[in-house]
Image (cartoon, grey):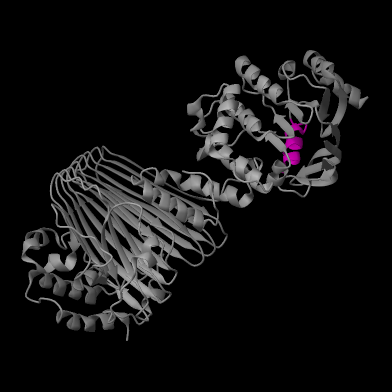
Amino acid sequence: MELKEKLMSSFMAFENTVDIDSPVHDIRTEAIKHFENEGFPTKRQEAWKYTSLNAVLKHNYSVFPKHEDALEFKDVKKYFIHDIDSYKIIFIDGKYSSHLSQTTHDAIDVCLMSSALTKPKYRLIIENYFNKIATTDGLSSLNTAFSAEGAYIHIPKNKLVEKPIQIIHFSTGNEAALMLQPRNLVVVDENSHVQIIERHQSLTDNPVLTNSVTEIFANKRAIVDYYKIQNDRETASLIDNTFINQKQESIAKVHTFSFGGKLTRNNLNFYQNGERLDSTMKGITIIGNKQHVDHNTLVHHIEPNCESHQDYKGIFNDNATGVFNGKVIVEKEAQKTNAFQANNNILVSDKASINTKPQLEIFADDVRCSHGCTIGQLDESAMFYLRSRGIPEKEARALLMFAFSNNVLDSVKIPEIKNRITKIIANKLGVNIGFDL
Amino acid sequence: MLKINNLHASVEDKAILRGINLDIKPGEVHAIMGPNGSGKSTLASVVAGKEDYEVNEGEILLDGENIDELGAEERAHKGVFLSFQYPVEIPGVSVTNFIKTAINETRKAKGLEDMPANEMLKLIREKSQMLEIDRKFLSRSLNEGFSGGEKKRNEIFQMAMLEPKLAILDETDSGLDIDALRIVANGVNKLKSKDNAVVVITHYQRLLDYIVPDHVHVLMNGKIVKSGGAELAHELEAKGYDWIKEEVNA
């Protein structure tokens, strides 16, 4: 049975597990219709021209894992940023793990989507925010149809949340093949600040497909720092659909570190619904073998005096393939927009490839929009310079690649994340570099 | 220390060095002079191990060992240092991190542990003071946005840190004002000892007023056409290169 049909028929079974009289369920039933019409995207669609899901969709995924599994913290500690105090929302095969988590309702809500969707005290937030910015494309609709579990974060106004929040999804391999559809909602009210780290980690080589949707609302003067660490096994694939709605003077930054996985597609969408706000998205991609990473970004400048900054670096080895598709829309009303986009790539091997495409649609006349993309090799004269100082070829290459991606790390505010990413990069490049960035 | 026998080298089938012979002993300073395009920088790059050049004939011996097959880093580990005419800008790597990495990689190649951090700091402080280098300068990205003089001073700083056996200074005087020239020359002189050697490649004699050579060689068309003492540099400064050309052609 094809995955689409399997999912369609699973929806009825899913309905037995949720409250079908709730308003949320109307949204779900609407969404499953969308998915039925749209299906999975194919390469015939412009936005999916360079990314094929065929190989990923062919597995016979379990949609509802039957087994429950427990993990010991010591066995999975390395996947946490464990050297800082943090809130944790942890899932194992899609099921919440209270044992590994640390949630809170003390002045802020850092808890579960399953509670938020069912308990009356969250009804107002759900009514106002749930599925308000997620799009109706096939993949997002599929997630909406099955939305039941994930992270729910609500920061009321004037709260500076000092502890970062870690959201981690583990998959154990108890199912021969597993499909996960986490649904996250993050609402940050006026003047509040939150930092979130998200990671998906498979613990075995059984195939995993994650189709996640995250809706983030940065209200007036809110600050949201979101870090995505994508360093999964080469049998795990991730489709990350993230939607961010910003109000005036808010700042939202998303860093995406893509170092692993079989296929990773990041659909990252910013909607600027307010003046004088700032949207930043940065990424470092370092992949090899037959890995594939696709960054598909959108910034929709709707109101005047706003900024957007995009800076993506990619290093591709072996037969790895990369895609960068950055779309910036500047509406007629969005005068004095300052939109910056850069995508720089290094192809380490002859067989690696990158397709990079900036897409600017500008309807306002008083704006500053710049974009640039480069694809190149490492600078040979720089290599000779480093080697002539006694730095061996392999280390010299690694040093130059570090230097190449360094400015993306500059804006990472949590030192422990910066250290972790630096270590992962060193590991990816196969060197033990004795300098700190 | 360095012995070059009948060295022929080419780039993309174009012959540039056509039979160089040179014998440099410990404690000596050699100057290599010559007009533009005579092969001076090529000679420096070939000795340092730049792979763009092909050695077609002859040999380069360092302490009796043929180093022709060694990579640039291995030559560096054996004590060869090239001060670049045009140092490369490397954004994202600070001067300090670069030199730390260079020193520790060289130590690793010799089977030594990393230099302890406090020792490294002390060394950096000492050598940067000698070259009148500001602390802030050390945390900047390597050569990025440096003035010509800063780049050259940074090269000599690296030389001071690495303490090479054989230092080749390729046009280190170009782009330096007189104060910077004096600082750089003083630095080189302080590093001189009876165990190491310096090769100064230059167009003009003015650096040689500060770093006095024991031997001066004139390179033309890829060959050393005349050798002499320090007085040869003065003669070239006064009379130019034409008289040598005539002498060679005669």
Marks counted in the figure total 0
Is B145 one of the magenta-colored residues? no
**Residue A124 visible, this orientation:** yes
The rendered magenta stretch, by its main secondary structure, is classed as: helix
Residue found at x 9% / y 67%: A119
Q: Nearer the viewer, residue B150 or B135?
A: B135
A225 vs B161, nearest the viewer: B161
The residue under the point 29% across, 81% down is: A67
Location of residue A321 in the rendering, given as x and y in whole percent from the top left corner = 47, 62
| Residue B39 falls within the magenta-colored stretch | yes
Q: Quadrant of residue B115?
A: top right
Per the rendered image, the range of residues in magenta is B37-49
Q: Position of residue A129 (x, y in %)?
A: 13, 59
The answer to whether any part of residue A134 appears in the image is no
- Which residue lies most toward the right here? B250
Residue located at (12% from left, 73% from top):
A25
Quadrant hosting residue B241: top right
Q: Is residue A266 above or below residue B174?
A: below
Q: Position of residue A388 (x, y in %)?
A: 66, 41
- Which quadrant of the rendered structure holds the N terminus of chain A? bottom left
